[in-house]
Image (tube, helix red, strand yellow):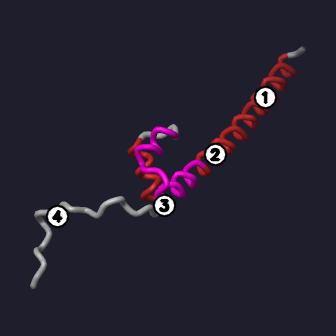
């Protein structure tokens, strides 16, 4: 093989590996989106709570919370803390 042949073989190999990487990345993204949709579905139906979901998925609790918030899952409890800067309600 000449130097040009070696270079062409290296280019071809890297192109194949890059294509395989892109395919794997696309499959990973699809799986992550499906898992996120499943998390939102389960939390919306209140079948499992966020702690149980966190134990079953490869995400930390904070990330599960971000997924739920982005998916429109309402909080389990309403806020009870009122900001000190908030104006008191007028009667």
Disc number for residue 82: 4
Horizontal side of 55 relative to 84 (left or right) equals right
Residue 44 lies in the magenta stretch: yes
Viewer-side residue, 15 vs 90: 90
* Residue 11: mark in rendering: 1
Going from N to C along the chain, the mark reached first, 3 or 1, is 1
Instruction: Check disc 1 and report its element: helix, strand or loop.
Output: helix
According to the picture, the residue beneath numbered tag 3 turns out to be 44
The residue that appears at 52% across and 51% down in the rendered structure is 39
Where 86 falls versus 56 (above or below)? below
The magenta region covers 35-56
On-image quarter of the N terminus: top right
Residue 2 location, x and y as percent? 88, 16
Work out whether mark 1 precedes mark 4 in sequence or the reverse, and give the earlier one.
1
- Say which element carries label 3: helix
Say whether disc 4 or disc 3 marks the residue closer to the N-terminus: 3
- Distance from disc 1 to disc 4, alpha carbons, whole Å, reads 62 Å
Q: Nearer the viewer, mark 1 or mark 4?
A: 4
In contact (CB < 8 Å): disc 2 and disc 1: no
């Amino acid at each position: 093989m000449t130097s040009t042949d070696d270079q062409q073989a290296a280019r071809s190999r890297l192109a194949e590996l890059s294509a395989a990487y892109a395919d794997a990345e696309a499959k990973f993204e699809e799986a992550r989106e499906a898992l996120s949709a499943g998390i939102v579905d389960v939390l919306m139906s209140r079948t499992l709570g966020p702690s149980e979901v966190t134990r079953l998925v490869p995400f930390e609790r904070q990330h599960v919370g971000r997924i739920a918030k982005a998916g429109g899952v309402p909080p389990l409890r309403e806020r009870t803390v009122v900001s000190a800067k908030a104006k008191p309600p007028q009667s």
